[in-house]
Each structure stands twice: as structure tokens, then as C-alpha cells.
Image (spheres, rainbow, N blue to C red):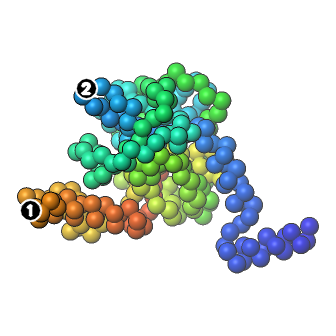
């Protein structure tokens, strides 16, 4: 017993990692993965659904009646969305990249679903755009869900994990962080974490390790590229008609700026209070 305690203390001192917390995190990930979904956009070819799709965001089941939570901006202006269970998303086959004004990245990862039944429909039944939360309803009845917890019971310094599909990749990714701020940001009750939130994470659950419940809905990343690179990325820079050989200079610059944003930690993640989702789900 004493030797185990000494070993744990040594690991903590040398690596800064608490073995007990590490075990809890891996346990949470295994427990909650079946409750996660990817909100996807089907790729239409010749007016028909091709089986190809891109990932637009994350969602999760909150009860055994088929209700889910995601971010409002993920389902913007839609009455119905297509989603896939996390386990089925990971079975999809990489099929290159797609470029479209519908997507926020110059090139978005595209995948082919092995089975058409992997795609499931969900109705958008309630939206709170001010707090970036939406409630979905589906006919799927899974065996697991994640309870919405109490925003008021978490504090700065508490450990949290969040799950999602960053950059639209088809692998569910887990991040562990700490609450670095809790309060109002732009009139939204917000949890700020010392971790990075990227495109595709939006709508995913922020889970309190102490509660084992969702305390926030991941919605944003604070921090941007330099103004010059931002202008290029958003097509505000000049040179859109300059082509050198077969290279479109501005498109090349866009992709470079996206690559920088993808691989350099530029900001801090945020999540809106789970209380907004609680209120919205009971209306």
C-alpha cells in the first residue's frame, strides 16, 4: 500500500499526471463514446446521395428517448440533420478531400460510409442561437447517454474532458483540460478551458471528471491567425486572379494559412453552460 502510494507520488512529481485521474479519463472515454455522434453533411453527386460525407460537428445523446444536444451553429438554418454514431464514423473509408464554399476549410476530409444504414436522421426541435445550443430528436434508441450536470458545481481548477471530431477527421478524439475561467463571456455563461477547440469539436460535451456529467457544450475557439493571414483565409486579400503555371497563388496561401491554424495551438477553448441545454430540452 505504501509502495503504491510512493509510486503514484513519484509519477505525479515527475510527469505532473495523477494516475487515478488518468484511469478515470480513459474510463470516461470508453463509457461515453457510444453516446457520441458526428453531425455530417452528405456529398451529393449528379443529384443523388453518393455515400460520401464530411463531418460538420459533434453531438451527444442526453436520454434514452433519442434526444441529443449539439451547438446551434452546427445545425444552422436546418430543420433536419444527418448524423452517424461515433463507432460507425470510424469505420468510414477516407476518400480524399473536398473544396466547397459550404465548408469553412479550403479542403475538408471526405469519407465513404461502408453501409447506408449508418446514416441516421434527426429533427432539430429547439434552437437557442444566443447561447449556441440546439436540441435534436431521433428515432434511435441507444443503451447509453450522458447526463447534463450542474454548471454551478464546477470551479476554476477542476479537471474536465471533451470529446469530438476536430478538423472533420473521422476519429473521435478525447482531450483533457482544466477549467481556467467560469463566468460570462459576451453575456453567455461560459466555461473556458486550457485546451484547444477546433472545427468539428463544436457541439461536443465538456464533461466534469468529478461529476461524470456534462457541464458545458463546446462551441468556440478564442484566438485567431494574424489579421493578414485571416484576410487571406477569408478571401479578402488581393491576388485572387493570379495564377502561376497551374498554381492558384491565393488558394495556395489559403491552404498554407489553414495548415498553420491546424497545427499550431492558437487559442483557448470555450463551452456554454449545460444549464442552457437543460432548459431548452424541457420546453
Residue in front for this viewpoint, 212 or 87:
87
Say the numbered circle drawn on residue 31: none
Q: Earlier along the polypeptide chain: callout 2 or callout 1?
A: 2
Residue 242 in sight: yes
Q: Where is residue 216 in the image (x, y as percent from the top left)?
A: 52, 47
* Residue at (17, 56) in percent of width and height: 235
Whole-number angstrom distance, CA of label 2 to CA of label 1: 33 Å
Residue 255 placement, left or right of 113: left
- Are the residues tagged 2 and 1 within 8 Å (C-beta)? no
In what element is the residue under mark 2?
A: loop
Circle 2 is placed at which residue position?
47
In what element is the residue under mark 1?
A: loop
Dot 2 crowding, Cα within 10 Å, few <14, some 14–19, many 20+: few
Residue in front for this viewpoint, 220 or 215:
220
Residue in front for this viewpoint, 233 or 75:
233
Residue that lies at the very extreme toward the top in this rendered image: 139
Residue that lies at the very extreme toward the front in this rendered image: 245
Q: Position of residue 73 (x, y in %)?
A: 35, 41
* Residue at (70, 50) in percent of width and height: 27
Residue 267 placement, left or right of 77: right
Residue 55 in sight: no
Circle 1 is placed at which residue position?
242
Q: Tell me: residue 104, above or below residue 159.
A: above
Residue 165 placement, left or right of 176: left
* Residue at (50, 55) in percent of width and height: 191
Q: What quarter of the picture does the N terminus occupy?
A: bottom right
Q: Quarter-wise, where is residue 270 in the image?
A: bottom left
Amino acid at each position: 500500500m505504501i509502495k503504491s502510494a510512493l509510486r503514484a507520488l513519484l509519477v505525479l512529481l515527475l510527469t505532473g499526471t495523477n494516475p487515478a485521474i488518468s484511469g478515470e479519463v480513459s474510463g470516461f472515454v470508453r463509457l461515453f463514446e457510444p453516446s457520441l455522434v458526428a453531425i455530417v453533411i452528405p456529398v451529393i453527386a449528379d443529384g443523388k446521395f453518393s455515400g460520401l460525407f464530411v463531418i460538420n460537428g459533434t453531438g451527444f445523446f442526453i436520454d434514452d428517448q433519442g434526444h441529443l444536444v449539439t451547438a446551434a451553429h452546427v445545425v444552422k438554418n436546418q430543420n433536419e440533420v444527418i448524423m452517424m454514431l461515433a463507432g460507425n464514423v470510424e469505420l468510414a473509408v477516407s476518400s480524399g478531400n473536398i473544396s466547397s464554399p459550404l465548408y469553412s476549410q479550403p479542403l475538408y476530409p471526405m469519407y465513404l460510409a461502408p453501409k447506408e444504414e449508418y446514416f441516421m436522421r434527426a429533427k432539430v426541435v429547439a434552437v437557442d442561437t444566443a447561447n449556441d445550443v440546439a436540441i435534436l430528436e431521433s428515432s434511435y434508441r441507444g443503451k447509453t447517454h450522458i447526463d447534463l450536470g450542474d454548471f454551478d458545481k464546477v470551479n476554476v481548477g477542476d479537471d474536465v474532458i471533451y470529446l469530438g471530431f476536430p478538423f472533420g477527421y473521422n476519429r473521435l478524439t478525447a482531450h483533457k483540460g482544466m477549467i481556467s475561467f467560469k463566468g460570462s463571456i459576451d453575456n453567455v455563461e461560459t466555461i473556458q478551458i486550457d485546451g484547444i477547440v477546433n472545427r468539428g469539436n463544436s457541439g461536443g460535451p465538456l464533461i466534469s471528471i468529478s461529476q461524470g456529467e456534462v457541464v458545458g457544450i463546446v462551441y468556440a475557439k478564442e484566438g485567431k491567425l494574424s489579421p493578414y493571414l485571416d484576410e487571406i483565409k477569408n478571401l479578402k486579400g488581393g491576388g485572387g486572379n493570379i495564377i502561376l503555371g497551374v498554381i492558384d497563388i491565393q488558394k495556395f496561401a489559403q491552404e498554407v494559412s489553414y495548415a498553420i491554424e491546424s497545427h499550431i495551438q492558437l487559442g483557448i477553448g470555450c463551452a456554454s453552460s449545460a444549464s442552457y441545454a437543460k432548459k431548452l430540452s424541457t420546453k
